[in-house]
Image (cartoon, rainbow, N blue to C red):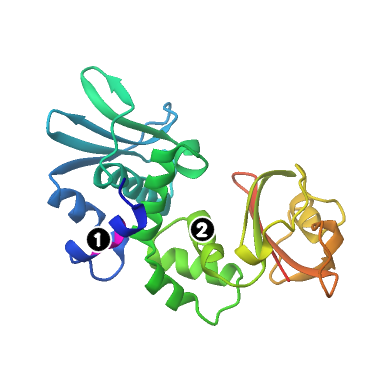
Amino acid sequence: MNNPVSKAKWVLETKEVIGIPAESLKTIAESEGIKYLFNDYPEDDWDGMLLWKGTKKAILVNTRWANSGKHNFTFAHELGHHFLEHQPSYLQNDQMGFRCTLDNIEKEQRPYETEANKFAVELLMPEDSFKFDMTGAEIDFDLITGLSNLYIVSKHACSNRILALTSKPCIIILTKGQSITSYTESRAARGFIKRMNKIPDDTAAYNAITYQQRQNGFLTCKASAWLMKVIPSNEIYECTHIHRESGTAMTILKW
């Protein structure tokens, strides 16, 4: 079985990718004889496909979400299926391949999808350069926005990469309304957050989301509102940014 991280590094080296990898995705596909199409399929639930018929392959990226960073991750994910030589799980009209939904790409735990995600992360945000660019910076929305713009990836993918590489305790929570849809922990923060489905009502995040308040900086609150483990200061720093159009929000917790 191919190691997805090692394979992504191999692709960057052998394809002589210089600069921001996202800008070379089409060139990489073309060098492998893979055709590609970006198109809006608003009624379909898939985000990307890798299809092949005989020896011919093609990648389709559904652009129904207006987020170029998300499109890049989908493209890289499908390239991962190709380079990792995954066997197809999708067959229709004499075409074989992979049909990847949002859950497949962002949440799926099946081996092939997990491997394709790991490949995409390393391909788009190489550990060495990404870690260098975040060295010495505080984990905040300026860092997430800056690095997501630099590497042309979504803020979600960027924040996950930051947490995977930092040595600091930090948790990033995604919400829809008051409901927690997912969260990611840094290594130093694993096992600290309470298991809950809703934002605690005695937090700054609750007020920001409920009253649509923009937070420009971090506020303190009792760590016990979020955490099930005691920390020395018993205080946690939190900041929430809201995407009003979608009703979603991202909250950073750190201590």
Instruction: Name the residue rendered at 36%, 57% in the picture.
Output: 5
Was residue 10 drawn as part of the magenta stretch in this picture? yes
Was residue 210 drawn as part of the magenta stretch in this picture? no
Amino acid type of disc 1? Trp
Measured from the top left, where is residue 120 in percent x and y?
Answer: 37, 53
Residue indicated by mark 2: 155
Measured from the top left, where is residue 221 in percent x and y?
Answer: 84, 66
Residue indicated by mark 1: 10
The magenta-colored residue range is 8-12
CA gap between label 2 and label 1 equals 26 Å
Amino acid type of disc 2? Lys
Is the stretch drawn in magenta largely helix, strand or loop?
Answer: helix
Instruction: Quarter of the image for the N terminus: give it.
Output: top left
- Mark 2 closeness class: few <14, some 14–19, many ≥20 residues within 10 Å: many
Measured from the top left, where is residue 196 in percent x and y?
Answer: 77, 45
Choose between 202 and 255: the one closer to the eye.
255
- Mark 1 closeness class: few <14, some 14–19, many ≥20 residues within 10 Å: few
Secondary structure of the residue carrying tag 1 is: helix
